[in-house]
Image (spheres, helix red, strand yellow):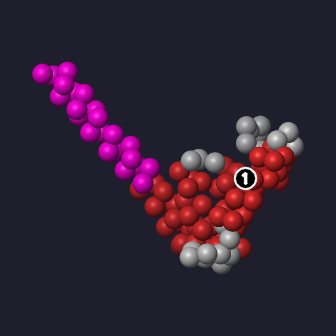
Amino acid sequence: METYYKPSDLPKFPDVGKDAPELAKKFFSYYQAVFAEGALTEREKSLIALAVAHAVQCPYCIDAYTQACLEKGSNMEEMTEALHVSVAIRGGASLVHGVQMRNTAEKISM
C-alpha cells in the first residue's frame, strides 16, 4: 500500500540539511543536547518524546521513539501510559475550547 509517510524515509532525516548545512548543524546539535542525560534520564526523555510524537501525530517520531523507548529499557506499560498522557492533554485541550463555543453560543443567543 502506498503511503505518504514511508518508514524507509526516516533514515533520510539528516538529508534535510543538505541545502542549509549550518542551520541543520545547529538544529541537530541542539537536538542531541536536549536528549542527553540531564535532570531527566534518556529513558524518561524518550517517553516524553513518544507522548509528544502522538500529540503532533508524527509517524516518523512514533517509530523512532517507540524503538528508543524499548532500547532504553521502557516497557509497554510505561509507553502506553505515556500515550494516554498525550491523549488526555490533547483531548482536554479540545474540550476546554468548548468554553469558546459556549461563549459564542451565549453571545448569539442574547
Does residue 52 appear anywhere in the picture?
yes
Residue 109 forms part of the magenta stretch: yes
Count the labels in the image.
Answer: 1
**How many other residues sit within 10 Å of disc 1, few (<14), some (14-19) or many (≥20)?**
few
- Which residue is at a point 70% across and 59% down the rendered structure image? 31
In terms of depth relative to the viewer, which is nearer, 105 or 2? 105
- Which residue is at a point 75% across and 59% down the rendered structure image? 29
Q: Amino acid at mark 1?
A: Phe
Side of 88 relative to 60 (left or right): left
Looking at the rendered image, the quarter that the N terminus falls into is top right
Horizontal and vertical percent position of residue 72: 68, 75
Residue picked out by circle 1: 27
Q: Main secondary structure of the magenta part?
A: helix
Horizontal and vertical percent position of residue 97: 33, 40
- Which residue is at a point 87% across and 43% down the rendered structure image? 18
Horizontal and vertical percent position of residue 42: 64, 73
Q: Residue furthest left?
A: 110
Give the answer, above or below, for where 56 lies relative to 62: above
Residue 20 forms part of the magenta stretch: no
Q: Which residues are magenta?
A: 89-110
